[in-house]
Image: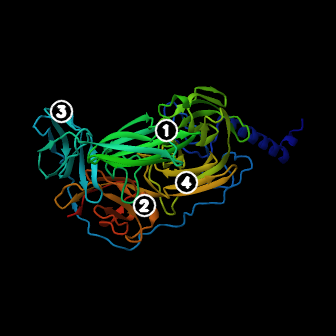
Amino acid sequence: MNLDRLKSFPVIAAVALLCAALLGLLLGFLTTVDAPHAVGQTTGSERAVPGKPLPAKDAPLDRPKDPLVRPDHSPKPDHPKPPDHRDPPVRPDTTKVRALQPGRVDELVTAPRNEEATATVIAQTEDPEGNRVNFAALSLSVKSPGMGWQVLTTNASPLGEGRFEFRRLYAGEYRIRNENPNYKPVEEVVTLVTGETDHVVRIVLSPAERARVEFFIHMEDNSIPQFATIQILRGNPDDGQSSGRFGNYEGSVLMAPGVVQSSTARYAPDRATGVIPFTVAVGTDTRFVFATVQNDRNFGAEKVVKGEPGLTQVDVTLKESDIGKSIANDGDPRRLSRLEMTLTLNGGKPVNFTRVNLRQNLSDFQYRDATRTEGNLFVWENILSGRWVLVAEAKEFHAAFVAQVEIGATEQQSLEIRTGHLRVTAAMEAGTAQGSGAAVYQVRLRPQGAGTVERVFTGNITGKTSDFIDFFVPEGQFEVRVQAPSKAMPFEIDPAEQSVSMSAGGEVELAFTLRAASNVEFQCLNGAGAPVPGVEFLFTTFAAGSVPETEKSRVQRGGVDGKCVSSTAPAGAVYLMIWSSSKDWNAPDKVFKLDLPAYAVKDLGGLVIAP
């Protein structure tokens, strides 16, 4: 062998390249490299999957497959795209930084928090002869300057001998009211002062006087239905339990609902006159809901009757509507039917359904699961005919499919679920720095009008300026909400919620901007140091008098103890607007200018907002 040839430059170069290739192959076996991924929350035995978020902790147990996650907007995606995918043209505008508008600022007056909920009201219930009444039904409400009476509780603690106790009350004005329809309406108002402990009030309960009511029930063509289902709602429901000055509060837990006693039954009107007689309490409003079904169509009406001495006659015309729809078939065994529903996806693709059920409406917590399931065939036995809402969830799409179905007309039915592509983009506002720890956000997908049907997913924007999650959702109307999970790094999200109309095969992108936020706590007090219940408040950069209507969705409500908590207050210079007695959107009672720290807790203590 010629050793000089082995020492030549070409041979040495070839050997060097071969060694490098072998070294690279060896390292490839020993190590793997994951693309940047969203770190989701881990629940139970679930583990984070590189490149995919986990559903949030409060998501339903039967979760769909994780949506595709792309950690940035580089030209090359980290995940395969759907067939015939096109990047939606929408991109979040992160160049606009919100600045505080010049405007009204009130003097910030603080005071120590009031934790002295030490007062007790004892209601002594008696009949007109002085005999104790042990089976009273009493409610307690507190007076809010701008919201009226707010029910605190309908469950007084019985002490025996006709005495009922309401404990741990702040100073303020309270109302004790009888809620038992067997007694006449009666109420007593008491004012508790700071330092007061026990306050005794006497409630005299007299048997309710009864009044006669005759309902003349007929259809629009004056024919008389054979049967009518009637729901009777008695009691004194108070306003303000879920309603605010500028909107409603969904699922509010701050205040208990008023007492409303109801009963539902099926009645046969007089065949000649259509009359159904009732008795009601004199002086009390009673609401009646009427419903019947003819030819699988719902007809209904609603009447409120105030009991008057003597006889009251009321004409009731049943018209086609959704009034009373949920009670229309009550007690009618002849309406039981059967449904065989076949569900397909995008022209026959395989589907792994995780949940399919029927509901009376989308806000109903109660539902009927299929009696029998065979693949994509779902069978319901002995189900009441009429209009129902079908809700289907599967691993192949990420928001619930909802459709109205008619049961009774055709036993065998089929529905095709067609999906489109939704991309939800979250981007940090320009100049916004992230705090320490994981920066995660939640995306909540809800069919429009569906109060109880929702899917929740978690994305991760840690160390990035933007992030997005790709979803496949059924065609239809959806509400998409982005928020920071509880006990996570606080963000203010703009906008908080958006609506989307998805078409089959459609491409839609929604953009949300994330800003640094603070967790803020404070208590609203009057000049005497007593809590002010029923306030509403808003953190905003807009000046009072020029706050756009879109900001109303950000208004929050304080508790009956005046305490207010927000986890989405924008960090930096911001206005805190508080409405206590005012109901004018452009004229809050107080406007304070604050400088809030990013990703931190700020306790403002007690704020004096009223005389």
Location of residue 525 in the rendering, given as x and y in whole percent from the top left corner:
22, 58
Spatial CA distance of label 1 from label 4 is 54 Å
Element class at badge 4: loop
Q: Amino acid at mark 2?
A: Lys
Q: Amino acid at mark 1?
A: Ala
Which numbered disc flags the more N-terminal residue, 2 or 3?
3
Location of residue 506 in the rendering, given as x and y in whole percent from the top left corner:
68, 52
Q: Residue 262 is drawn in which quadrant?
A: top left
Residue 587 or 289: which is nearer the viewer? Answer: 289
Spatial CA distance of label 2 from label 4 is 30 Å
**Dot 3: within a 10 Å radius of its alpha carbon, few (fewer than 14), some, or many (20 or more) residues?**
some
Question: Residue extending furthest front?
Answer: 272
Q: Amino acid at mark 4?
A: Lys
Q: Which residue is mark 1?
A: 328
> Residue shown at 11%/50% (left/top)?
195
* Mark 1 vs mark 4: in front: 1
Image-based side of 519 in relation to 38, left or right = left
For the question of whether residue 115 can be seen, the reply is no
> Residue shown at 50%/58% (left/top)?
495
* Mark 1 vs mark 2: in front: 1
Which numbered disc flags the more N-terminal residue, 3 or 4?
3
Q: Amino acid at mark 3?
A: Asn
Q: Residue 31 is drawn in which quadrant?
A: top right
Residue 219 or 242: which is nearer the viewer? Answer: 219
**Dot 4: within a 10 Å radius of its alpha carbon, few (fewer than 14), some, or many (20 or more) residues?**
few
Spatial CA distance of label 2 from label 3 is 46 Å
Image-based side of 16 in relation to 162, left or right = right
Q: How many marks?
A: 4
> Residue shown at 47%/58% (left/top)?
515
Element class at badge 3: loop
Which numbered disc flags the more N-terminal residue, 1 or 3?
3
Residue 552: numbered disc? 2
